[in-house]
Amino acid sequence: MITVGQSKARRLALHAGHTAGLAVFMVFAMFPLFWLVKISLTPNNLLYSEGITLWPSSITWDNYQFALLGSRFPRFFLNSVVVSLSSAAIVTLVAAAGGYAFSRFRFAGKVPIMFVMLLTQMVPLVMLIAPIFKIMSPLGLTNSLTGLIIVYTAFNVPFATFLMQSFFDGIPRELEDAAMIDGCTRLTALRRVIFPLTLPGMGATLGFVFTAAWSELLFALMLINSDDKMTFPVGMLTFVTKFSVDFGQMMAAGVLALIPACIFFAFIQRYLIQGLTAGAVKG
Amino acid sequence: MAEVTVRDVYKAYGAVRVLRGVSIDMHDGEFVVLVGPSGCGKSTLLRMIAGLEEINSGDILIGDRVVNDVAPKDRDIAMVFQSYALYPHMTVASNMGFSLEIRRKATDLITAAVGRAAGTLGLGDLLARFPRELSGGQRQRVAMGRAIVRQPQVFLFDEPLSNLDAKLRVQMRTEIKALHQDMGTTAIYVTHDQVEAMTMADRIVVMNEGVIQQIGHPLEVYDRPANQFVASFIGSPGMNFLEGTARQTADTSWVEMVDGTKLPAPRTDAEEGQTVIYGVRPEALTIDEEARSGLIARVDVTEPTGLSTLVFSRVADSITCAFTMDRLDLTRGQPIGLVPDVARVHLFDQASGVRL
Ligand SMILES: Nc1ncnc2c1ncn2[C@@H]1O[C@H](COP(=O)(O)OP(=O)(O)OP(=O)(O)O)[C@@H](O)[C@H]1O
Ligand SMILES: [Mg+2]
């Protein structure tokens, strides 16, 4: 029984270590968020006078009120939603189609195409700003949300395609074979059998592209110059003026900007749960 | 129900030639087992019959229709996969009814068909479950159920039992055989397990390296193997092979072993002095405990199973297996005589492996 006791103690210790590790990580990851919320609620006059405290002596909603009613923030927010959702949707559709082809078909030029797609991921984006501006400008795509959607789609498709390909690779081919024997065409098999099983993958891709587009600053900054086309990250910069940085309002806007991302993930989270293909093959 | 004809079919993946001129005539209602070692092309052939794999040349007919370019869904076949390939997001009932649903059959008709199949297979209580909630054996049954619900012209099985434990495998083997006898549908069954092949088949097709070695009734293949490959592949424990030289006079023939022992041999068209392989199954060897006759060997190990005993003994450098129902008291290293039953001895050409 001593060995059993020992192993139990060991298990407990392991469990405690595990939990402690996670806790440290959580604190590390969540602290900036906490700080964001804290500052957004701190009245301006207390911001510098109280020194560094975990919680201000009094809180205010003024910053939120200003961000929502007194600034252009709602406009930026809407622009961001349009751009991020559209990019995410388009990328996911394109990547799903491409990933399926890469996963299931052999065709001429497959390897070169994959190589080129990989190559695009190796170029630092900064180097592309000038050429992209040059291309987009005569097409009237600068200072336009459509232009931004195109750029985000182009940049995210390669990675998303590889992501989707790996999801399709994880679905046994025999499921399609079985479906085709059961009476499906390749397309029906795709719709009735493969598609429902790839929902987690699509959710992941959607979430990935959405967050990337939601927080993208570089291209939004370079391609957009009028107030009514700004996305939220660019808009955040308007809180920084030549003379001061209005931290309280900026943080309030930041907190508000987190909300759609949270809602979005809450929505796709159930598609992200693994194990949907469990039970397909073998035992 | 239909006959299936495979006519001179070739298949290559790039430079790898997987099937090299395969022809089989499967009769209506027959249970044909394709058997052969791993990688010999059994699954490929089955998938070609199913329409999941393209044919490089040759024809495949189901009934009297050439189906080379017919989509799998239009071939009226059903297939049970080794991995079962159940749809993970559908319940057992939907899995089984899927083929009918795709064909837009009425709901009550589907329910009835699924209910019948579930009854046959004892799946009645599991219809609402998902595949992940089933044991391996239950999944296997669902896969079977999905195949029989539709009453296809031909059943295709690709090693459907290889993921089950030994006991369940034996049980399912019997059930599948019984099911086939009830339904009378042509069935093509792939396995690399020669016991499955022997017990289930109306006819066995033995394949090796993309070439058919022999087609015949199980016992015919067992008793008169076409070549050394078939002889070694079919039967467990396997046939013993000893190298020797064919000798004959006007009225007797024998094979002279390297050590000079003369073993009686059947009359064949082996030429005098030809190097041959002397093949004899374990049960065709009688053990002479006094070592006064036959091929002299030294006992290596004995494996009693209760019913019978396998005696492994050493002749020169090779191990020979003998099967006996007697309870012999043998010790390791003891010399024994192995006396072959000449009526059940096969001679194979040493170079080509063909039976003489
Ligand atoms: N898609 C493919 N591309 C290239 N080679 C393949 C492909 N599919 C099968 N092969 C090759 O074809 C040969 C026959 O494969 P097959 O699956 O028919 O074997 P099998 O007899 O079913 O073996 P097992 O008993 O292991 O299932 C193998 O050598 C295999 O490597
Ligand atoms: Mg196989």
Image: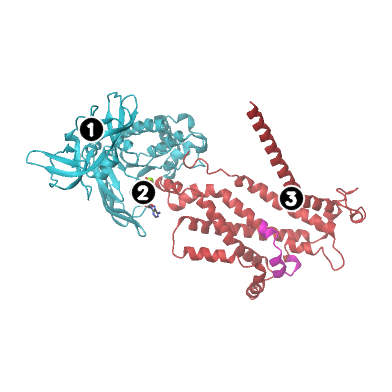
- Which residue matches tag 3? A29
Q: Nearer the viewer, mark 3 or mark 2?
A: 2
Instruction: Tell me the SS state at disc 3.
Output: helix
- Which residue matches tag 2? B39
Using the numbered discs, state the Cα–Cα distance from disc 3 to disc 2 in whole angstroms. 52 Å
- Dominant SS of magenta comes to helix
- Note the chain letter of the cyan one: B
- Label 3 environment density (alpha carbons within 10 Å; few <14, some 14–19, many ≥20): few
Query: Within 8 Å: ligand 1 and the Cβ of disc 2?
Result: yes
Give me the disc on residue B338: 1
Q: Nearer the viewer, mark 2 or mark 1?
A: 1
- The magenta segment is A211-228
Using the numbered discs, state the Cα–Cα distance from disc 1 to disc 3 in whole angstroms. 78 Å
Instruction: Tell me the SS state at disc 2.
Output: loop
Using the numbered discs, state the Cα–Cα distance from disc 2 to disc 1 in whole angstroms. 36 Å
Circle 2: residue type: Gly
- Label 2 environment density (alpha carbons within 10 Å; few <14, some 14–19, many ≥20): few
Instruction: State which quadrant residue A92 falls in.
Output: bottom right
- Note the chain letter of the red one: A
Subunit of label 1: B
Which residue is found at the position 17% from the left and 35% from the top?
B342
Q: Is residue B73 above or below residue B142?
A: below
Residue A219 highlighted magenta (yes or no): yes
Subunit of label 2: B
